Image (spheres, coloured by chain):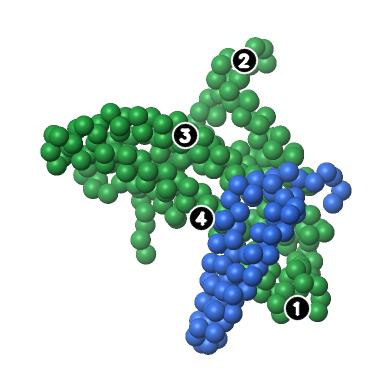
Chain colours: A green, B blue
């Protein structure tokens, strides 16, 4: 078995960063006029709360904190993409780390692990809310009615399996593609290693990098947001009886 | 459903392609596991893969018709 230590370490560090900042803001929180950063954190909280209220039908105190965690954590992991691509690996190679993947979400293991966790949670809530019999009924009668039971079982199983797959692959695909574009843009200037004449491409690299950077801020936010909303939706589907 | 319909699933429209492809992949994976379990090498995998394709198209079609369906 291979352990992707770079992914684990960086994602845990980002989690610690999130918890530390959150704890500090909570400790310094005031009832009066909030400062700039407290305001910012509160607006994120309110935003997530609105999403949960809009998309989640039942009542479950676990959902909102989990949605917040997913949103901020995934965003932070995606944000590592905006650090210049070779900066941290080069620093790592000085320290003796010869292979370093900076963005945890461009390692398939991280998004898939989160998607699987969501899947297991939704399995748990399905069994808890609908009961084993109700959940089994969904498998037996869901897409085609009760006269095509074997096909129904297979179809529902495929559908359930496709949910975590698409959740994880979507995040991974978008982040990996984004990272790849950054690498390709970096190669424009990197071609100067072949000869100084290639430096003619350097202005193009700056412009393209700037453009993709600005666009990528939207992408990472959108992907974190989609991951959060779909988590809420999938868990919400587990909480509704009439599926 | 008791409350107003949730808005979230509309977001699935952003990446309908992922839904389609993951249905196909899920079908093949499931078939692969069943094959490994029953020892019926490629038959179940192809069957379930085909069902994944059909189910994926169906799901995308329904999704595009009514983004609020789950």
Decide: few, some or many residues near mark 1? Use Cα within 10 Å; few <14, some 14-19, many ≥20: some
Residue A52: image quadrant is top right
Apparent side of residue A8 relative to residue B44 in the rendered image (left or right): left
- Would you name the residue on which mark 1 appears? A149
Residue A46: image quadrant is top right
Chain name for mark 4: A
Q: Do pointers 1 and 2 mark residues of a single chain?
A: yes
The quadrant of the image that shows the C terminus of chain B is bottom right
- Would you name the residue on which mark 4 appears? A169
Q: Are marks 4 and 1 in contact (CB under 8 Å)?
A: no
Q: Are marks 3 and 4 in contact (CB under 8 Å)?
A: no
Residue A136 in view in this figure: no
Q: Do pointers 4 and 1 mark residues of a single chain?
A: yes
Q: Residue at x 73, y 70 (%)?
A: A139
Chain name for mark 2: A
Q: In front: A139, or A120? A: A139
Whichever of callouts 3 and 1 sits on the residue coming sooner in the sequence is: 1
Q: In front: mark 4 or mark 2?
A: 4
- Would you name the residue on which mark 2 appears? A34
Decide: few, some or many residues near mark 2? Use Cα within 10 Å; few <14, some 14-19, many ≥20: few
| Distance from the alpha carbon under mark 3 to that under mark 1 | 47 Å
Instruction: Tell me the number on the disc at residue A215.
Output: 3
Whichever of callouts 1 and 2 sits on the residue coming sooner in the sequence is: 2
| Distance from the alpha carbon under mark 2 to that under mark 3 | 31 Å
Q: Position of residue A38 (x, y in %)?
A: 58, 20
Question: Where B15 sits versus A53, above or below?
Answer: below
Badge 4 marks a residue whose secondary structure is helix
Apparent side of residue B6 relative to residue B2 in the rendered image (left or right): left
């Amino acid at each position: 078995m291979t352990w992707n230590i770079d992914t684990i370490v960086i994602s845990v560090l980002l989690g610690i960063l999130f918890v530390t900042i959150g704890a500090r803001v909570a400790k310094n929180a005031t009832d009066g006029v909030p400062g700039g950063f407290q305001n910012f954190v509160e607006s994120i909280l309110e935003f997530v709360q609105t999403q949960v209220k809009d998309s989640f039908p039942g009542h479950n105190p676990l959902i909102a904190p989990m949605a917040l965690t997913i949103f901020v954590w995934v965003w932070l992991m995606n944000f590592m993409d905006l650090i210049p691509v070779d900066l941290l690996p080069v620093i790592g190679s000085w320290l003796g780390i010869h292979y370093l993947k900076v963005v945890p979400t461009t390692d398939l293991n991280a998004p898939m692990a989160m998607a699987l966790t969501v899947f297991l949670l939704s399995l748990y809530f399905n069994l808890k809310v609908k009961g084993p019999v109700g959940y089994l009924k969904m498998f037996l009668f869901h897409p085609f009615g009760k006269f095509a039971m074997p096909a129904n079982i297979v179809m529902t199983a495929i559908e359930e399996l496709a949910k975590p797959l698409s959740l994880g692959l979507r995040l991974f695909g978008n982040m990996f593609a984004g990272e790849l574009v950054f690498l390709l843009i970096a190669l424009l200037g990197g071609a100067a290693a072949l000869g100084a004449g290639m430096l003619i491409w350097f202005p193009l690299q700056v412009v393209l990098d700037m453009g993709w950077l600005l666009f990528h801020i939207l992408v990472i936010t959108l992907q974190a947001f989609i991951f959060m909303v779909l988590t809420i939706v999938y868990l919400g589907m587990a909480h509704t009886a009439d599926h | 459903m008791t409350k107003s319909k949730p808005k979230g699933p509309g977001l699935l429209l952003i990446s309908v392609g992922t839904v389609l492809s993951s249905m196909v992949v899920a079908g093949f994976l499931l078939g692969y596991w069943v094959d490994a379990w029953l020892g019926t090498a490629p038959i179940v995998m192809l069957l379930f893969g085909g069902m994944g394709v059909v189910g994926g198209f169906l799901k995308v079609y329904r999704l595009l018709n009514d983004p609020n369906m789950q």
